[in-house]
Amino acid sequence: MPDYLAQRRNMVESQLRVNDVTDIRVLEAMGAVPRERFVPTSRKATAYADAPLEVVAGRFLMEPRAYAKMLQLAEIKPTDNVLDVGCATGYSSAVLARIAARVTALEQDADLVRVAAETLPTVGASNATVVQGGLFEGHKAKAPYDVIVVNGGIETRPDALLAQLGEGGRLVAVVKAGAQGHATVFLKEKGLVGSRAAFDADAQILPGFREKVGF
């Protein structure tokens, strides 16, 4: 039987710490959440590989290293209200639930919503609530958010999500331009939003965030 605890510890030590993930709360959260519970049985053997992990056709959990660095970039506080966009099976929300006060786990795929809603309570994520809806539109009902985490790539500016940030709010996502991708933090101050590319990263583009090609 695989030793998932050992694999999880190895992930933290050999993928996160060596790649400048220093936020102790991020390290502890990712060292505690059993990633293998959020992946299909056929993929459990590679649950802790440093690569994106496909959970259903076209939908992935981000690679641990990039995801951890994005959470660190967001500077999440213990009192923060967080929107987790594209939560898929709920792994990202389980991690966030250990770092923030409240997590709204947004997913549009009905099957993934069911999996996330069933799995999150089993890992103690009682402060995470799963909601179904379009990813690009966000979830206004629980706005404003202190932090919005987009679990994937975006080619278009996420204006609907940025509008749901509170003052001082941060949104993190992988901004894609062709084959290039950069983990980017958007910061709202005095009603205005600025952005900063922090590090190179790659991620599958989430539904609704692909640039529309005109004729």
Image (tube, rainbow, N blue to C red):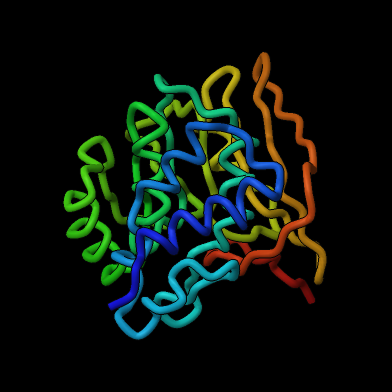
To which quarter of the image does residue 114 belong?
Answer: bottom left
Position in image of residue 12 (x %, y %): 53, 51
User: Which is more toward the observer, 2 or 148?
Assistant: 2
Looking at the figure, which quarter contains the C terminus? bottom right
Q: Is residue 27 above or below residue 67?
A: above
Q: Is residue 127 above or below residue 93?
A: above
Q: Is residue 202 above or below residue 124?
A: below
User: Which is more toward the observer, 119 or 149?
Assistant: 119
Looking at the figure, which quarter contains the N terminus? bottom left
Along the horizontal axis of the image, is 144 left or right of 20?
A: left
Position in image of residue 79 (x %, y %): 40, 19
Along the horizontal axis of the image, is 21 left or right of 58?
A: right
Residue at 18 percent across and 49 percent down: it is 121
Along the horizontal axis of the image, is 9 left or right of 171?
A: left
Residue at 44 percent across and 39 percent down: it is 28
Furthest-top residue in this view:
190
Residue at 36 percent across and 59 percent down: it is 5
User: Which is more toward the observer, 112 or 99?
Assistant: 99
Residue at 43 percent across and 47 percent down: it is 31
Tell me how many marks there are: 0
Position in image of residue 91 (x %, y %): 38, 56
Furthest-bottom residue in this view:
42
Position in image of residue 164 (x %, y %): 50, 32
User: Which is more toward the observer, 2 or 125?
Assistant: 2
Along the horizontal axis of the image, is 213 left or right of 138?
A: right
